Image (tube, grey):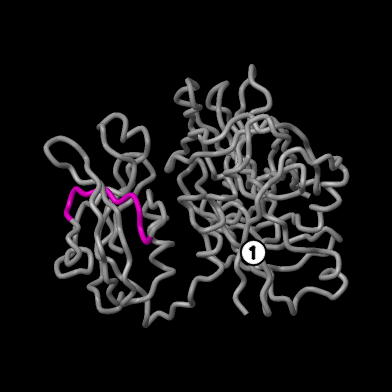
Amino acid sequence: MTEKDFLRITTYAAVFGLVGGITFGGVNFAANKLTANSSIESTAAPDDEEEKQAKVSQTSSSAGSSSGVSQVAEEVLPSIVAIDVQIQENVSDIFGRTYEQKGSGSGSGFIVAQDEDNLYIATNNHVVADATEVSVKFNDEKVVNATVKGTDSDADLAIVQIPLSDISTETMESIKVANLGDSDDVKVGEQAIAIGNALGYGTSVTVGYISAKEREVASEDVTMKLLQTDAAINPGNSGGALVDVEGKVIGINSAKYSDEQVEGMGFAIPISTAVPIINDIIEAQQVSEDEAAYLGIKGSDVPEEYAQYYNMPEGIYVGEVSEDSPAQKAGLLTGDIIVSFNGREATTMAGLQEKLGRCKAGDKVKMTVKRLDNGEYKDVELAVTLGRKKDAEPAETQEPRGNNGGFGYEN
């Protein structure tokens, strides 16, 4: 196995808003086995087919532009990039022996910002997750090495960064920052154009319409509200742009619904949801080891199937609160379920780690938890002053709970 394939899992239901099982791990090294006729799959390309501070802002959309698709594509393509990644993972053979193996995968991205030193490219977290090497191919076919500036796995977003000094003058003249729209203004039935690195072959353009808004789609770890479109979204399109008839980005292509009886059900992260998170990542302060923040909990993920079975909210179940930790001082209790951290949704330990990693010791943050009160979970708002990680006692790693993908350790 030298290529990345998609993990597909069975949908839970397709009633009223689509609630399905979705995997945003499209660059995993695994045999591409369909677990059921119906599935939602990520759109990162499988390997065997791969070929001064910036700030993101939006502008209002205006439906009804008469611009042709070719004109829109010409306007948008300079902002679109292909992303190739290399990953090294541990695999086991039939005899139980473990060894390291390299693999690769492809996805898409688009340029969202530029400052005096760097170019910033938005993509999906599942495109670059665990990548040891990242390269970006621009619209002029030039390839440049890149680094991952930051990620938010809860939102399936990532920012890839390239120093301007690594980009030739010719390439800089041929590319541009994408024009971002406002997905809140988008109406069902408006035309939508998906642009990205489909199948890893290079940039392609497909056309359709906005089929629905705020479709609730569930992955193994998180549930997201996405735009639905019938514009063809294929493997390799992950992280690419969904644009309106004015060439404004209204979504970030992420997944599609795969079924023998279903066609034209693709999903994109609304750009209005993505922009604040993208800005958080771009503007994230550099945190030294001495300044690393500490919360002081041990917890496990509560995925959708567990939440439904045990009638619990989705989020991070707090299994232990360390004594005299910032979490304890703020009033966090064992049994609380964390759903928001520092103003952003936090439903997995991995996502909480990423957000905590962008904070410094001494930062004051807001945290929302669900707390059981007389048989009912109620929202509780907590104000936390983060501690210094190096001052905390080393934490012991806990065993995962069942096969839910969650894990417990101290943050």
Q: Position of residue 348 (x, y in %)?
A: 38, 50
Image quadrant occupied by the N terminus: top right
Farthest residue, direction top = 261
Q: How many badges with numbers are in the image?
A: 1
**Height in image: 6 above or below 115?**
above
- Is residue 13 visible from the viewing direction of this image? yes
Q: Nearer the viewer, residue 50 or 254?
A: 254
> For this view, does 17 lie left or right of residue 131?
left
> For this view, does 246 lie left or right of residue 226?
right
> For this view, does 302 lie left or right of residue 48?
left
Q: Position of residue 395 (x, y in %)?
A: 25, 66
**Height in image: 52 above or below 156?**
below
The three-letter code of the residue at mark 1 reads Glu
Q: Nearer the viewer, residue 288 or 184?
A: 184
Q: Quadrant of residue 390?
A: bottom left
Q: Nearer the viewer, residue 315 or 4?
A: 315
**Height in image: 234 above or below 85?**
above
Magenta run includes residue 26:
no
Magenta run includes residue 340:
yes
Question: Residue at the location (33% across, 76% down)?
Answer: 361
Secondary structure under tag 1 reads strand
Q: Residues within 10 Å of mark 1 (few under 14, many from 20)?
A: some
Tell me where the magenta segment starts and ends, as one range.
333-342
Query: Would you name the residue on which mark 1 appears?
Result: 133
Question: Residue at the location (58% across, 45% down)?
Answer: 270
> For this view, does 231 lie left or right of residue 301?
right
- Is residue 1 visible from the viewing direction of this image? no
Image quadrant occupied by the C terminus: bottom left
Q: Position of residue 78 (x, y in %)?
A: 81, 58
Question: Residue at the location (68% across, 27% down)?
Answer: 264
